[in-house]
Amino acid sequence: TYSMTEPQAGSDPNYFTCQAHRDGDQWVINGEKWFASNFRYASFAIVMVITNPDVPVYRGSSMILVPVGTEGLEVVRNVGLAGERIADGDHAYLRFTDVRVPAQNLLGEEGAGFRIAQERLGGGRVHHGMRSVGMAQRALDMMCERALSRVTKGEVLADKQFTQEKIADSYTEVEVGFPNDYESLLSPYAENKEDYTGTVYGYVPADIITLVCVKHGGVI
């Protein structure tokens, strides 16, 4: 599992407080992590920790592998998200109290934690962006099908000016989202790596899905 987020900081590494210091041939970790996905099924955690608090987090964080069952590693509770039981979800709230692991458990170089995190998260952001656009496209298709099949007040919904406006707006938003995500997908492979920004069109299809519910007679 990947352990980055912290209770007091969310995913903003500038406010991380979970630290690790070197003690001989071991790393000693103290702090807390939040929303460690699928920890209950994992064999180890990849933990992002501060190893040098005297420099910016972009150069002072590292990734350390911590095997499940290591002394001092405590599951405070398994947090439930949407669709999960309140206190029995798959996202663990972890506490590290003088957790000791071998120095060789450092992933990559010391101070490279932020860079490693971005390499890991970059692909995930593209995936989430593309999935959101796909959901929006499916919702738009459903809305169009409903508009063509539902008859009210003597005509199909598709002939109503307000319906046409909302379908046009939704189509525009989907068309804007796809090329942005596609460009972000290709940019890591650009010849000039400095051109890669890692940005993704963070499209959320909530508005379109709400319109689909309305056109299907849902009460909002």
Image (cartoon, rainbow, N blue to C red):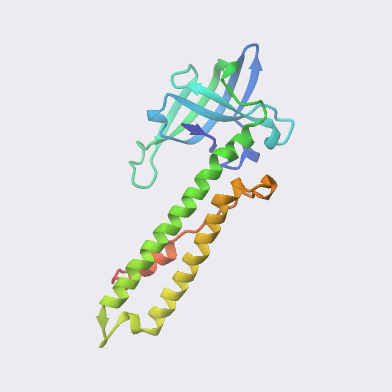
**Which residue lies most toward the bottom here?**
154
Is residue 66 visible to the viewer in this orientation of the structure?
A: yes
Is residue 201 visible to the viewer in this orientation of the structure?
A: no
Residue at 47% across, 73% down:
169
Total residue callouts: 0
In this view, 205 is above or below 61: below
Q: Is residue 112 left or right of residue 84?
A: right
Query: Camera-side residue: 84 or 116?
Result: 116
Screen quadrant of the C terminus = bottom left
**Which residue lies most toward the top here?**
24
**Which residue lies most toward the right here?**
54
Residue at 51% across, 22% down:
66
Q: Position of residue 125 (x, y in %)?
A: 52, 48
Residue at 62% across, 32% down:
113
Q: Position of residue 70 (x, y in %)?
A: 47, 18
In this view, 4 is above or below 177: above
Q: Position of residue 117 (x, y in %)?
A: 58, 37
> In which quadrant of the rendered view does residue 102 lie?
top right
Q: Is residue 67 left or right of residue 80?
A: right
In this view, 102 is above or below 111: above
Residue at 40% across, 81% down:
162
Q: Position of residue 7 (x, y in %)?
A: 53, 38
In this view, 128 is above or below 180: above
